[in-house]
Amino acid sequence: MSDKILIIDDEAGIRSSLKGILEDEGFTVTAVPSAEEGLSLLKRENFDIILLDIWLEGLDGLEALKRIKQDEENVQIIMITGHGSIETAVKAIKLGAYDFLEKPLSLEKVVVTVKNALNQKRLEEENIILRSKFRQKYQKLVGVSSAIKELKKKIAQAASTKASVVIYGESGTGKELVARLIHQQSNRKNKKFIHINLAAIPEHLLHRELFGYVKGAFPEATTDKKGKILLANGGTIFLDEISEIDAPLQLKLLQLLEEGTIEPEGSLESIPVDVRIIATSQINLTTQVAAKKFREDLFFKLNVLPIVIPPLRERKEDIPLLIDYYLDYFSLELGKKKKTMTPAAKEAFMNYSWPGNISELINVIERFVIMVPEEEIKPAHLSLLVEPREFQLIPRSTQALSLKEATRHFEKEYIHRLLMTNGWEINKTAQELQLSPGELKKKIKSLGIRMAD
């Protein structure tokens, strides 16, 4: 299939000459005289390159450029400008245009610029694919716990059907990852996956964000805008925090699930949509239904395949694997030397409750990779980045020891951590411990504290 080019220029002679020379080069070319016609065409067709005149009657080229880039980030746009408007052309480059051509046009330069723009588009697409493959390599559930094994089974079951899914779990448990895995394993994997956080958008804007609107629907609606649901047509729409939506929006979602149609704001027509809904909730929707805050009929339509993700504290046996996995990931992602973590440091991670779940653990690991200069992360490093009280420094294997032995272990860890914080300054550390420098040195020796620990 040949590459598709759209020409938007109000001069018939320019449209004709550009169309002719580019078709001779083997491109499929469409030409229209106004930005409005071009934007309307872009709602129905995809193009690889757009040649866009800056000075157009009605909607000008710069405004058209902004609107096109909002919906079609990867399309390459070449601006056409007259003499004396170089400053405007530079502004267009800043807004996302690939390049600009000056009138009178050199047809030879047009062909070269178009081919260069296509090469740039392909490079960007290849980069997106490579980054996507890299992220997908690290976009999987990690663990050996029975909870993770069961979760993987449910993901496979959900992926084999187009039924709606509600994913339940505390904040940070990985609900979006589970949703993406369902999408990637389904027959919709080559279509769009669009994520929208329902709780983060004001109610009066959320309807427009999801369902879109038509020109004239309200004073600021100067052109049609597709909603997220229509943009996800054929793919998956991921509705984060479904329990937060109001009654009118619940009714519109029910219409989508029952009839497979949506109505943009201001439109009298229903648009057919084929989209799979995956939703999330931190609370059980049955309680919302009982409290009359969530429609029962919508609940039954959405909650066909409920999936519950356990908090990290209930699957601590997975933590060592998660540590190694994300140390590897961030070392590659950030271009750092690969880091490892000592068993003692992993033990401290195991003893922590992780109220922020996987998200918190990932954040801590990323900070370690960035901020710890050594290649091995030790217990002493934990106090540099995390509040000391957050990690229990006495390993579980020693918790059954005598009080004397446990006290010795704690004293050793506490003094070592304080020395690390103070850069191994004996006098300063001794003062904070209310000891003499000589007494501190004796303790360091008797407890076997070493700088390398």
Image (spheres, rainbow, N blue to C red):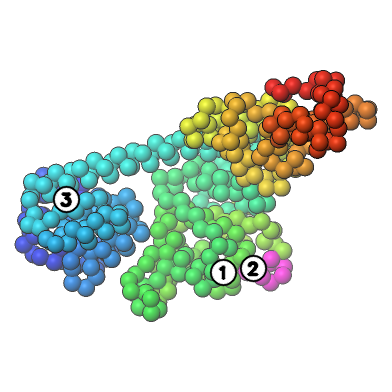
Instruction: Please give the residue where the numbered disc 2 appears in the rendered image.
Output: 294
Whether residue 396 is visible here, answered yes or no, is no
The tag on residue 250 is: 1
Instruction: Please give the residue where the numbered disc 3 appears in the rendered image.
Output: 28
Inspect the image, locate mark 3, and give the three-letter code of the amino acid beneath it: Thr
The magenta segment: 288-296
- Determine the image quadrant of residue 85: bottom left
Side of 383 relative to 334 (left or right): right
Whether residue 322 is visible here, answered yes or no, is yes
**Relative to the observer, which residue lies in front, 161 or 315?**
315
Image: 131 above or below 302: above
> Residue 34: image x %, image y %?
19, 67
Q: Quick check: is 194 in the magenta stretch?
A: no
The tag on residue 298 is: none
**Which mark is first along the chain, 3 or 2?**
3
Q: Crowding at label 2, few (<14), some or many (≥20) Cα neighbours within 10 Å?
A: many
At a point 38% along the width and 76% down the height, the residue shown is 220
Q: Secondary structure at mark 2?
A: loop
Side of 248 relative to 145 (left or right): left
Q: Quick check: is 290 in the magenta stretch?
A: yes
At a point 31% along the width and 57% down the height, the residue shown is 95
> Residue 229: image x %, image y %?
45, 61
**Separation (CA) of disc 3 from disc 1:** 44 Å
Cβ atoms under marks 2 and 1 closer than 8 Å:
yes
Q: Crowding at label 3, few (<14), some or many (≥20) Cα neighbours within 10 Å?
A: some
- Determine the image quadrant of residue 320: top right
Q: Secondary structure at mark 1?
A: helix
**Relative to the observer, which residue lies in front, 103 or 256?**
103
Inspect the image, locate mark 1, and give the three-letter code of the amino acid beneath it: Gln
Side of 172 relative to 265 (left or right): right
- Determine the image quadrant of residue 341: top right
